[in-house]
Image (cartoon, rainbow, N blue to C red):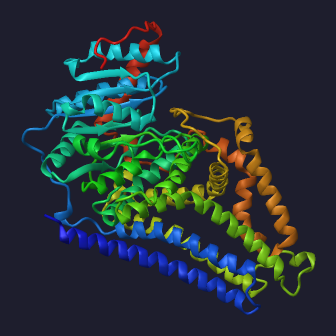
Amino acid sequence: MRDTRGHRATAWYRGLALTFAATSAAAAAALLAQSVAADGITAWDFAAVVLILMTTAWLSWGAAQSLVGLPPRARSDRTQPAPSGPFPPTVILLPICNEDPVAPMARVAVMDASIRAAGLDVDIAVLSDTRDPAVLPREREEFARLHDRIEGADRIFYRNRTDNRGRKAGNIEEFIRRYGAAYEFAIILDADSLMEGETVASMIARMRDEPDLGLLQTLPFVVGARSIFGRAMQFAASFHSPVFARGLARMQGRTGPFWGHNAIVRVRALAECCGLPELSGRPPFGGTILSHDYVEAALLARGGWRVTLDETLGGSFEEGPDNLLSHVRRDRRWCQGNLQHIRLLNAPGLASWSRFVFVQGIASYLVSILWGAFLIVSVLTTMAAPPPNYFPEPYQLFPVFPDDRTREFVALCIGIGGLLLLPKFAILTEAALTRRVTGFGGTIRAAGSVVAEILLSSLIAPILLMYQSRSVIEVLSGRDGGWPANQRGEGRLSLREGWAAGRWIALFGLAAATAVSWFAPSILWWLLPVCVPMMAAPLLIAATSRSGAGWFFLVPDETTPAPIVAAFRAEMAARQREMPARAVTGAEPSHAV
């Protein structure tokens, strides 16, 4: 029976968010249009109005998502407690590819222990796509050691496939095709994922009790960050993400998200709906579908299955990048994968909201180009309509509000800043009222961390804008970025490495600031927050990779880590103490599948 009440709530939330985004974008465009209308609208003016309309719509949509997520869940909307009764056969899938094998096998060991402590009988399959001849023997040895140490290890499997077609999605598809009939549910993880046994039990019970549920996505919390960059991202994920995720769940309803890991899926639904083809043509727009998770969620919804995000499910964890360059490498793959979805917008039978999600993902990268274009057009319009005193005295070189155009430009900057800041301070208020700030050091410390995260995000935003713009240009020009292996555990970067990676951004920022100071000095002060971080890109890349942040960015994991996280750290410490005494055998594990 269709949940009409839930459908009406989803439609209401969507309408509210879309109305807020459209109204904010229209107001920004009207404000800018008013400022240029007196002198006659030029082609550059028209371009600026269109660009501010699109970019403000994007910012407003993000702000609307957080505002929709602010109200707490109603009592009837909460996750069902205390799973009981028989549990259908379930397998945990852990795909790995050219990883350092010690950490993934340690995760398997502690998850198996937690699952058994929860009274579950769940299989675990390590699905290897590793081809590196230096890594594969170590991977096999680590699994053999794991298998020998674990009680009842006949539930834990390993296989290394020789055909890597389809990458991660193909890896899982191959397992489902060969062994999926043995299971009703599959929990899909990443190599850096952790999940508590009680969370696994709750997810299985939820899938068992809701037969129309095809996929249930958890909100994984980032743990283990050490650097300034990593701890800031970890804080944002722990503090802000629950509210954003709640808003996302309310707006997406039955056509919720899949992020590729830390989720449970009904095997029959996955097998029936989610066989992914190779796209015709060459990469970057052809070949393997990189952002397969979005597509799989859309295909499940097309097949009539419900896809749901539940941010209240705890006990789900992952690791994040520890420096900006590691983040950028991941982001390059996500950029190519999202832009690939341009080819899927007209795929037959998809739900309208699934198509809208594709558009959001595409826009999340194209907006970097739009922001850059808006800044360029703003300079050009200022050059085309100089203030009366175009060559002022030296002490007047940078007047703050020389004319109506600049005043409107400043007003736009303030309004856009408000869309960025309002959600974060609203979430801070929500966390204080619900006492969620306790895990973040209390209200004062949490507020300081929010401000520090805003300042750090503001500094690195122009750098990320440049990297994302380059990624978009590369994809649109036909350059394939591939699927590089994740370099987990990357740490401190030297200033030399920062210069090698960011010098092109620094030189661009210097050239832009020089050009603006010469041709459009009236808006230089308002572009310095963009140009200065660009010029400092090598220093920021290196400095934010250092350990620290001190008093700021405290998260609950740093004071009271979850049992599964604490167990993993103890297991890793024990394995690292044993490592020097071990030799690589290269033997095939006895329990391979």
**Residue shown at 21%/45% (left/top)?**
203
Q: Quadrant of the N terminus?
A: bottom left
Q: How many marks?
A: 0
Pick whichever, 567 or 165, lies toward us.
165
Q: Is residue 313 above or below residue 367?
A: above
Q: How far across and down, in percent of the image, does residue 112 sit? A: 25, 28
Task: Name which quarter of the figure residue 370 lies in.
Answer: bottom right
Residue 496 in view of the camera: yes
**Residue shown at 63%/76% (left/top)?**
50
Q: How far across and down, in percent of the image, does residue 30 sit? A: 60, 85
Task: Name which quarter of the figure residue 138 lies in.
Answer: top left
Residue 309 in view of the camera: no
Q: How far across and down, in percent of the image, does residue 85 sit? A: 6, 41
Pick whichever, 332 or 224, lies toward us.
332
Residue 204 lies left or right of residue 401; in this view the side is left
Residue 478 lies left or right of residue 145; in this view the side is right
Residue 241 lies left or right of residue 92; in this view the side is right
Q: Quadrant of the C terminus?
A: top left
Q: Is residue 267 above or below residue 126?
A: below
Pick whichever, 527 or 574, lies toward us.
527
Residue lying at the far bottom in this picture: please name it.
Answer: 38
Q: Is residue 105 above or below residue 194?
A: above
